[in-house]
Image (spheres, rainbow, N blue to C red):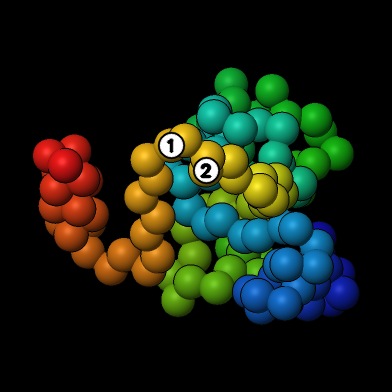
């Protein structure tokens, strides 16, 4: 059972300032959690899941240290979720370490920021390739 301080802490990770300070973030839903656990299991800080999800993903769960898994019920899931319709599992994950400096000498570099439409990104890459 989650205590009130745990719920508040998890909810507070929706704020960018705290995510930056703690280097943690929240991911929700079976599909994204399964992908994270398969591709980067070392980044898992804590996993909050319903008994249904734990049973359905038993093979994956066995690869996670037991102290990182907390079984919760639907009501607790609703209290920690940022989604209007919570979906079985919430994970707190460590942010990847960012490379602070990038060596750009003698390289061709394309830097993009705030791409809104994936189609635009594809067009930019094709144009850069042409040049």
* Residue contact between numbered discs 1 and 2, judged by CB atoms under 8 Å: yes
Give coordinates of residue 8: x percent, y percent: 78, 77
Q: How many marks?
A: 2
Where's residue 70, x and y in %? 76, 48
Residue 124 seen anywhere in this rendered image of the structure: yes
Which is nearer the eye, 92 or 112?
Answer: 112
Label placed on residue 96 = none
- At horizontal 72% and vertical 58% (from top left) the residue drawn is 24
Mark 1, Cα crowd under 10 Å, few <14 / some 14-19 / many 20+, is few
Q: Residue at x 84, y 76 (%)?
A: 4
x and y percentages locating residue 128 in the rendered image: 21, 45
Q: Residue at x 85, y 39 (%)?
A: 67
Q: Using the numbered discs, state the Cα–Cα distance from disc 1 to disc 2 in whole angstroms.
A: 6 Å
Task: Name the residue tied to disc 1.
Answer: 107
- Picture quarter with the N terminus: bottom right
- Relative vertical location of residue 72 with respect to residue 66 in this rendering, above or below: below
């Amino acid at each position: 059972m989650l205590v009130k301080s745990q719920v508040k802490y998890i909810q507070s990770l929706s704020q960018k300032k705290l995510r930056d300070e703690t280097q943690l973030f929240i991911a929700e839903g079976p599909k994204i959690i399964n992908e994270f656990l398969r591709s980067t299991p070392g980044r898992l800080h804590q996993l909050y899941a319903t008994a249904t999800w734990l049973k359905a993903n038993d093979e994956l769960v066995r690869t996670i240290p037991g102290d990182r898994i907390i079984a919760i019920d639907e009501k607790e899931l609703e209290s920690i979720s940022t989604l209007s319709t919570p979906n079985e599992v919430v994970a707190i994950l460590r942010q990847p370490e960012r490379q602070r400096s990038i060596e750009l000498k003698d390289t061709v570099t394309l830097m993009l920021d705030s791409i809104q439409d994936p189609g635009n990104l594809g067009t930019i890459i094709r144009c850069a390739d042409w040049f």
